Image (cartoon, grey):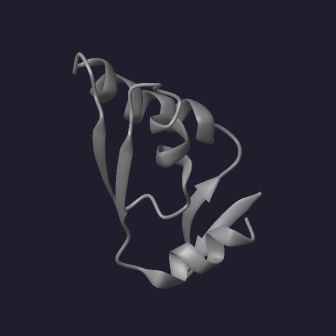
Amino acid sequence: RVLYLDNVVQSRLLGETAYHESLVHPAMFSHQNPRRVAIIGGGEGAALREVLKHRTVEMVTMLEIDEAMVNASRSF
């Protein structure tokens, strides 16, 4: 499956997990005890999924400027 928004690929299932793991985990492991995390963008939720794998995380704030991305991701 591929998620398009305005004819631009936003996310796809093939390779998506490896991409987001490599994006999120180095930053998370660079901090001894990450409790509060901010995600800028990432409306499809994959970065959030990876952040929440870390047991020390207590709060995540996610900012997505494009409401259409959030709405499209709900059915993806």
Q: Position of residue 61 (x, y in %)?
A: 34, 57
Quarter holding the C terminus?
Answer: bottom right
Of residues 71 and 13, the one nearer the viewer is: 71
Quarter holding the N terminus?
Answer: bottom right
In the image, what residue occupies the spot 31% across and 18% down?
29
Count the numbered circles shown: 0
Of residues 30 and 60, the one nearer the viewer is: 60
Q: Is residue 61 above or below residue 30?
A: below
Of residues 35 and 38, the one nearer the viewer is: 35
Q: Is residue 21 above or below residue 70?
A: above
In the image, what residue occupies the spot 53% across and 83% down?
68
In the image, what residue occupies the spot 28% across and 29% down?
34
Quadrant in the picture for residue 3: bottom right
Q: Is residue 34 above or below residue 36?
A: above
Quadrant in the picture for residue 35: top left
Q: Is residue 27 above or below residue 15?
A: above
In this image, 43 relative to 29: left or right? right
Of residues 15 and 67, the one nearer the viewer is: 67
In the image, what residue occupies the spot 48% across and 47% down?
48
Q: Position of residue 14 (x, y in %)?
A: 70, 42
Return the residue found at the far left: 31
Q: Position of residue 56 (x, y in %)?
A: 39, 26
